[in-house]
Image (cartoon, rainbow, N blue to C red):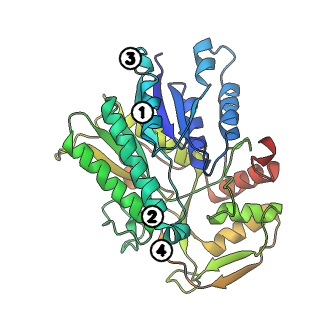
Amino acid sequence: MVKQRVLIPGGAGYIGSHVVLCVLLTRRYKVTVLDNYHNSFPTSLERVSKIALDALPADASEEDKEATKIDVIKGDLRDKSTVDSAFAKYADKSADDKIWAVILVAALKAVGESGEIPIDYYEVNISGLITLIRAMQQHKVTRLVYSSSATVYGIPKTIPIPETTPLAAESVYGRTKQFSEVIIKDVCDAYPKEWRAIGLRYFNPAGAHASGLIGEDPRGKPGNLLPLLSQMAVGKYRDPGLKIFGNDYPTPDGTCVRDYLHVMDLAGGHINALDALDDDSKFADTPTPGKYKAYNLGRGKGMSVLEMVEAMRKVTGYEYPYEIVGRRLGDVPDLTADPTLAEKELGFKAKYNLEEMSRDLWNWQSKNPKGYETAN
């Protein structure tokens, strides 16, 4: 079977490494990763290759074994020459080995931080996208899966949130994702015969691969709740403890509600998206000229901050000390997905529950108390 090549900028990070793994496990693709390791580690990809190789059947071909090796290019998505070289590397190869599609995961992604260093977020998330699209156009690569975010919805009027909800991001991070979606749609509208793209609006990824070999290991203090809870329980991070931003939201217990989705479910959604971008797919057959569509990736079940703290306490046995402080700029009360459209058009459906997410997260953290640090 011919294996097409997929370029995955940001493939060494938490979400990216799980996406790379799911792509390799299909045994239908070869992978090139472009990453500057700003918030990730090279070790993650070495472990991804091992998991993929070990998952092969005993009678796997040499081609299958070779395809578990990831071509890694260290570089920044904003650097034109580096991005161009990632495509040019395969320009003289056979048609089967040229880059066929791109899954763009690379981005700065912390809501709170984005309000403190907005220019950095706009430069990395938007300038990087534009550099990538220019290189894609030059090399005639016109299939893109884009990692978007539920933050594009701002404070939605309807819960759970359908994709028809107007986009009105409240945070700088959310606006970088919203503006990026507009850019991608404009490109698809301008070149409807060539371009197809899918935006995947992530809700809240959590958990880790069941092996415990790969997981979330942010450099510095975690900006998201779940890795913070796991690092507190293992003793990697405890001082000054857990701060809960606001308990006066219009939610059952007053704390923010989020739709937590197992990272392996999320990563699997990218395979659904790649399938939809295939030339034989009918996903883009719409009355409008544009070939861009966006889908929610979530479970459709919201959990509050306090409920997540309790879920992690049950798994880890750690009693979390916490302090209620004021609301954080950019946070919204409830982000719960309506995943109906993704299931209907992409065939996406979450398989893992909250207990499995918490268990797999703790399995990763307890096996790797210092994250990837000991391997670097």
- 58 horizontally vs 369: left or right: left
Quick check: 149 above or below 197?
Answer: below
- 261 horizontally vs 142: left or right: right
Q: What residue sits 74% from the left and 49% below the top?
A: 364
Determine the image quadrant of residue 322.
bottom right
Badge 4 or badge 1: first in the primary sequence: 1
The amino acid on which the numbered mark 3 sits, given as a three-letter code, is Ala
Give the camera-side residue of 143 and 42.
Answer: 42
* Viewer-side label of 4, 1: 1
* Viewer-side label of 4, 2: 2
Quick check: 356 above or below 303?
Answer: above
Image coords of residue 271 (percent x, y): 47, 37
Determine the image quadrant of residue 69.
top right
The amino acid on which the numbered mark 4 sits, given as a three-letter code, is Gly
Q: What residue sits 37% from the left and 72% below the top?
A: 158
How far, Cα to Cα, is label 3 from label 1? Answer: 18 Å
Indicate which disc residue 84 carries. Answer: 1
Kindly state the secondary structure of the residue where label 1 is placed.
helix
Residue marked by disc 4: 330
Kindly state the secondary structure of the residue where label 3 is placed.
helix
The amino acid on which the numbered mark 2 sits, given as a three-letter code, is Ile
Residue marked by disc 2: 119
* Viewer-side label of 3, 1: 1
How far, Cα to Cα, is label 3 from label 4? Answer: 45 Å
Image coords of residue 151 (percent x, y): 44, 65
How far, Cα to Cα, is label 4 from label 2? Answer: 16 Å
- 40 horizontally vs 130: left or right: right
Badge 2 or badge 1: first in the primary sequence: 1
- 226 horizontally vs 89: left or right: right
Residue marked by disc 3: 95
Image coords of residue 358 (percent x, y): 69, 58
